[in-house]
Amino acid sequence: MPGELIPFIDLKRQYAALKDEIDAGIARVLDHGRYILGPEVAEMEGALAEYAGVRHCVSVGSGTDALLIGLMALDIGPGDEVILPAFTFAATAEVVILAGATPVLADIEPDTCNVDAEQVEALIGERTRAIMPVSLYGQTADMARLSGIAARRGLAVIEDAAQSFGALYGNRRSCGLSTIGCTSFFPSKPLGCYGDGGALFTDDDGLAQAFREIRVHGQSARYHHTRIGLGGRMDTLQCAVILAKLKRFEWEIERRLEIGSRYNRLFDEVGIERVRQRDGRTSVFAQYTILVDDRDSVRRRLEAAGIPTAVHYPAPLNEQPAYRDRCLAGALPHSRRAAERVLSLPMHPDLDEAQQDRIVAAVAQAAAGN
Ligand SMILES: *Cc1c(COP(=O)(O)O)cnc(C)c1O
């Protein structure tokens, strides 16, 4: 029974729900014409800083730009090492290499798929300057433990929160848990715009000033270049889209929590292994991810049933051609195993219960080999 195709992420329904606000926001920008660093940019930064509970939000061209600018502001470069999980999107390691430093890959916890703090501590050496935990699938790593380790060893913590904007760690928000928090507004992320965008968060006034200068070619005043920067601004139109989307964001986060916990309950009932959430943390489920053996055949069966899937990510970074010789790596058995078994399913705030039931039933069947 193939049934109707269920969208993996449903941005059309989101736009339909917010059409008036989004169209009006875009029209306002077209009217005033300040496409670069217009008033919506500062307005969005203020709203997001307040939401994340930090002093400063600085918007930039993408999540990747945010991570790179964070490293540049900390003056991390040649001779330095940055510890990050082997099991993440390539951008986390890419920016470290672009900055001229060396990524050191740590293994993950098998249940959360987030970086293992004990592994991180074991990899700290003379050259280590920072730890970059990734809040994978929408849940933060063990930030208290990582911050404790970093404080003892004099290291910075940069949270790659590209997938976790809106997630809670205790009563604090992702992006507000470390020296620097970086997120992405890529359309499919929990808070997405209609193109590329990203932001850095910090409580440190000096770092915030550095981010603002770096995103405009290192200028501290017009045509006065005091540092090496890049063209890394987020444009005003995209900030207007985010401002409109904030009207529904709390509702969306609630829906993500409800849908994620319902998936958890249903998969536990049918005995399907899944990425787990730790007590005291919420996930915003940028991805809802299960763990299956014989993943390729499960995917084929789900596709035939009208259920799209994705794999985040099919290989740990030390096995990617461009990264193999550019990273230092510890032992990575859990990253390897996760890369073989993870499977992400449709997940978005407008997913309804009937669709969810159909997905869970189809997964149970596919995993049983039918
Ligand atoms: C999406 C993502 C990024 C990069 O964000 P862009 O806005 O696409 O540049 C970085 N890290 C992780 C973990 C991501 O999921």
Image (cartoon, rainbow, N blue to C red):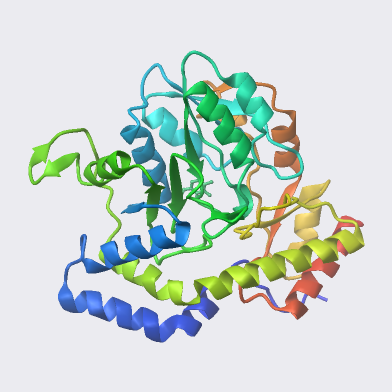
Q: Residue furthest left?
A: 223
The answer to which image quadrant residue 122 occupies is top right
Where in the figure is residue 274, as x and y percent of width and height? 78, 52
85, 157: nearer the viewer = 157
Residue 114 appears in the picture as rendered: yes
Q: Residue at x 62, y 29 (%)?
A: 319
17, 279: nearer the viewer = 279
Left or right: 322, with 22 as reference point: right
304, 126: nearer the viewer = 126
Left or right: 276, with 321 as reference point: right
110, 142: nearer the viewer = 142
In the rendered picture of this protein, how many numbered marks are placed on residues? Answer: 0
Q: Is residue 138 above or below residue 111?
A: below
Where in the figure is residue 139, as x and y percent of width and height? 63, 51
Q: Residue furthest bottom?
A: 20
Where in the figure is residue 192, as x and y percent of width and height? 46, 64
Q: Residue at x 52, y 39 (%)?
A: 90
Q: Is residue 163 above or below residue 23?
A: above
Residue 363 appears in the picture as rendered: no
The quarter of the image holding the N terminus is bottom right
Where in the figure is residue 167, as x and y percent of width and height? 58, 57
The quarter of the image holding the C terminus is bottom right
